[in-house]
Image (cartoon, rainbow, N blue to C red):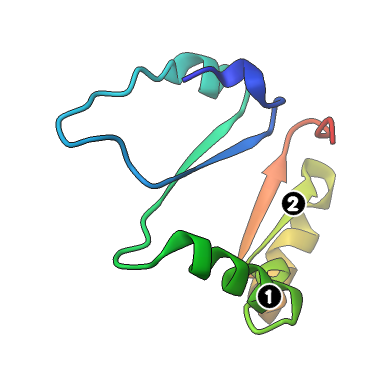
């Protein structure tokens, strides 16, 4: 897997799977050093061409409040991150040591 195709702090969502018995080549060190994330998306019996547009609509119309699940904070805003988790305005606070490039 080429981590060079998406930027530092990037997230790669792998939808679907390789054929049974396949072994992907992933450079984990590059992912850690460049702070990149690989997310494997398992959909069960979903039909991706039908399901993904529905999922996008649910996020867009607020049925799935994606912005509430995670929010990024700088290290200086550590206390704000803690407060947001405690008051329930965000489920997961991510602390960034440097500002992302996006």
Distance Cα–Cα, label 1 vs label 2: 23 Å
Q: Work out whether residue 65 can be spotted.
A: no
> CB under 8 Å between callouts 1 and 2?
no
Which circle marks residue 70 in the picture?
A: none
Q: Which residue is the site of mark 1? A: 57
Dot 1: element: helix
Q: In this view, does 81 lie above or below 99?
A: below
| Residue 47 relative to residue 11: left or right | left
Q: Is residue 12 above or below residue 24?
A: below
Front in this rendered view, residue 23 or 78: 23
**Which residue is rendered at x = 55% and y = 36% of the image?**
37
Q: Work out whether residue 25 can be spotted.
A: yes
Front in this rendered view, residue 49 or 83: 49
**Which residue is rendered at x = 53% and y = 23% of the image?**
32
Image quarter where the C terminus lies is top right
Q: Which residue is the site of mark 2? A: 72
Which of pointers 1 and 2 lies earlier in the amino acid sequence? 1
Q: Mark 1 or 2, which is nearer the eye?
A: 1
- Looking at the image, which residue sits at the far front? 49
**Which residue is rendered at x = 36% and y = 56% of the image?**
42
Front in this rendered view, residue 54 or 76: 54
**Which residue is rendered at x = 77% and y = 42% of the image?**
75
Quarter of the image for residue 97 reads top right
Q: Position of residue 15 (x, y in %)?
A: 45, 47
Quarter of the image for residue 68 reads bottom right
| Residue 24 relative to residue 51: left or right | left
Q: Where is residue 5 in the image (x, y as percent from the top left)?
A: 65, 21
Dot 2: element: strand
Q: Where is residue 43 in the image (x, y as percent from the top left)?
A: 37, 62
Numbered marks: total:
2
| Residue 13 relative to residue 89: left or right | left
């Amino acid at each position: 897997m080429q981590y060079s195709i998406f930027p530092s702090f990037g997230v790669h969502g792998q939808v679907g799977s390789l054929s049974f018995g396949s072994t992907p080549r992933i450079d984990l060190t590059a992912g850690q050093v460049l702070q990149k994330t690989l997310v494997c998306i398992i959909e069960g019996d979903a039909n991706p061409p039908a399901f993904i547009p529905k999922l996008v609509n649910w996020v867009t119309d607020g049925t799935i409040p994606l912005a509430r699940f995670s929010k990024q904070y700088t290290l200086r805003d550590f206390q704000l991150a803690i407060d947001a988790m405690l008051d329930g305005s965000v489920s997961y606070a991510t602390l960034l040591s440097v500002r992302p490039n996006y």
